[in-house]
Image (tube, rainbow, N blue to C red):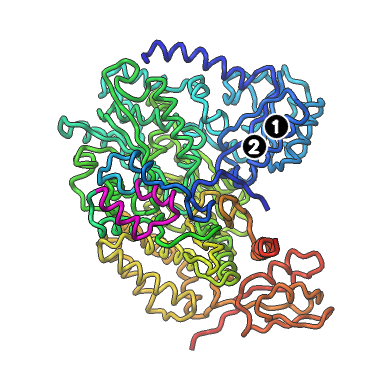
Amino acid sequence: MTAARAPRRSARATGGTPSADPWPAIMRAFPGDPSDLVPVLQRAQNALGYLSPDTVRRVARWLKLSESDVFGVATFYGQFRFTPPGRHRLRVCLGTACHVKGGVQMLETLERRLQVGAGETTPDGEYDVERVLCLGCCALAPVVTLDEAIYGQMSVLRLQEMLDGRTHA
Amino acid sequence: MGARTLERRRHRAAARWAAFTAGPRPLVYVGMGSCGLAAGAGEVLAGVQAHIAARRLDVETASVGCIGPCYLEPLLDVRLPGRPRLSYANMTAELAVATLDALLAGELPRRHLVGRFAADDGWDGGAVPADDDLPAAFAAVPRLADHAMLAHQVRIVLRNCGIIDPEEVDHYLARGGYRAFEACLGTPWRDVVDTVKLSGLRGRGGAGFPTWVKWLVCREAGSGPRNLICNADEGDPGAFMNRSLIEGDPHAVLEGMLIAAYAIGASHGYVYIRAEYPLAIRRLRSAIGAARKLGLLGECVLGSDFSFDVTLKEGAGAFVCGEETALIASIEGRRGMPRTRPPFPAVSGLWGRPTIINNVETLATLPAVMARGADWYAAHGTERSKGTKTFALVGKVRRGGLIEVPFGTTLRSVIYDIGGGPTKDFRAVQTGGPSGGCLSEEFLDTPIEYETLAAAGSIMGSGGLIVLDRDTCIVDTARYFLRFTQAESCGKCVPCRVGTGHLVGILDAICSGRAELADLERLERLARVIKASSLCGLGQTAPNPVLSALKYFRDEFVEHIVDRRCRAAVCRDLVIYRVVPGRCTGCERCVQVCPTGAITGPRAEAHNLDVDKCIKCRACYEVCRFDAIAGDAIVIESRGQRAD
């Protein structure tokens, strides 16, 4: 099993509770034009972990858009989430290469073991389980990622071992 | 900064490149593309660096992009003074350290050695000693360029990938970088368009529209400001050509943008790139910074009256944004939904201005076309499709990775010569991702061209090439792509929003043995309606996977419906798990891993598998195949059961 680590980028590392108010920095970075909506939401989610109703209201007021406009755009794009993230993010790649090599079984194993569906967070807030369409490392299919670590050539057994190792740790 | 300053910088660049390729200190190169990192390149580099620090070795390290053979990752190259660069495959940190130590001690480890750079491969700019000047042991190492996966390729777009350090603009400059653009600056824009016209370059995003036609329309559309957009929203699942290219050679994309912007008279450029590609974004950002410092981006580029700058826009996860008008809506901060054309973006695009959207690969090809001439480029490929194309060769193939071949190469050559053939018996090859189709064996000798693939019912697409073997179910694969397009349909037009949902519903029924033969006609009719009546390319091509599968693999659909059998044993409602009594060693490993207690058995006797409790999770199958004491006794099979 191989794992590659890269620096964490989001608020997830701190459990989704940022210490400092990110808004001054965000409002300095953009001129406040409505066309900046997507990058503003990206920055906000990066800093806060998700887009709360309060965040949406704030962005709407700043960019002089209606809240429904902001929600409309945010819900259109797969990147945005509207519930607080879990402490760790498990992603199962279901790109074509991973699909033909058994990615679905990886997802089912996770769903069964953690008792959540794809796109949900475990009740204890420990894991998000997400499906992702192609991480672009198809030669390593099937691929599962845990936070920034990528696990290639996964199997049901190795996935179970990984989860066992983590719960016992 | 003017052209003269850039010329001075080129001298420094040449010296730094010489040090990189033939310097007096041993140098270790690690392929740090996303694929390499996923395979563990980060640990390899960290391990080597720690070893160098601990032993105070006089060795340098460098990161390079990906040279393509992903199945060999992580790759570690080592160059000793006066020796060619050697490539070692499938490294771990320990192996890398051992290999480095052995080389420094004067040995030549053979394990994991895949090849060497050579004086005549053109990769290291002639810095490599000629074969005659090498010790016999080194000369006997096969050239990496002769490696089965690389020998059949023609690397024009990928010329620098895996060779240079993508974070070093000096490496790009030393290999002739930005010279093509400088030459363009001194010529009328029309000459640039003419060269591209003569080269026969067509859009590499998939549709294959002649690049120069689009440019000319844009150039002649009014006199106001124009925009250039580089489409790096590579959304096809199973395709990573653009990511690898940006990660390995970001300046080639920027130089291509400069050339295109000069030709169409654009003052501002955007790179619309997937947020899922953090490394590519980082490399591009750093390249943009370096280009600005050199005066290649910004006001009055290189002291001329041409001004151009580039903004990065991260996509937010919507496949439909690969469509031109949807992409524009997304950059403008709206929902990424397409609109009817005309007006075409080349006439009225971003902010209502004439806008050209070119694919990453199209743009990265331009410097080579301008530098070496239209004739040279057009000599590659075929009459209708000129030049080369990159492909992500993945799926059930022995040697997977990123490749570049001239148009006209046959699918057979790509899959067998370059890819080493399918892992098991060949069943189909899928091209063009969710907009493409599955082609059967009879198409293996088809030369790859835009037209030939379209005539066969698939498309070129952006370059995903997925090999399917006999363990892959064609019906399930078609359903997979339809589920994808259904989920990614933006919902604006009814045929795509509602129609794809019904296609998935029928395919679900077929995969679970609930369908009737008349469903095949419904499927086909609905597919044709969606194709004919959808608003944008996403909907118009969404039925291709189904239509092509029905055309070439109809018997498998019939088999699912009539016999309730999936010959690849993939469709879960049509398979059962079974213990073969004669093979079972009674080791109880499967009993331990079964999550539902479906397998029982006294130890040392053949186990019993209760199909009613079995949830088909595969755990027992895996443990029985890979555990040393198990007997490979659990099989997944679809025996079929004729419908009444």
Judged left or right of residue B189, residue B457 is right
- Report the chain holding disc 2: B
| Viewer-proximal residue among B640 and B633 | B633
Which residue lies at the image location 34% right of the left edge and 47% below the top edge? Answer: A40
Q: Amino acid at mark 2?
A: His
Mark 1–mark 2 contact, CB under 8 Å?
yes
Q: Amino acid at mark 1?
A: Pro
Residue matched to label 2: B147
For residue B383: magenta? no
Which residue lies at the image location 29% right of the left edge and 56% below the top edge? Answer: A57
- Residue B142, given in percent of the width and then of the height, sits at 70, 32
User: Would you place residue B558 above or below residue B117 in this image?
Assistant: below
| Viewer-proximal residue among B41 and B204 | B41
Q: Main secondary structure of the magenta part?
A: helix
- Report the chain holding disc 1: B
For residue A47: magenta? yes
User: What span is colored magenta in the figure?
Assistant: A40-63
User: Would you place residue B54 above or below residue A115 in this image?
Assistant: above
CA–CA distance between discs 1 and 2? 8 Å
- Residue B423, given in percent of the width and then of the height, sits at 63, 56
User: Would you place residue B541 above or below residue B411 in this image?
Assistant: below
In which quadrant of the rendered view does residue B387 lie? Answer: top left
Which residue lies at the image location 23% right of the left edge and 56% below the top edge? Answer: A66
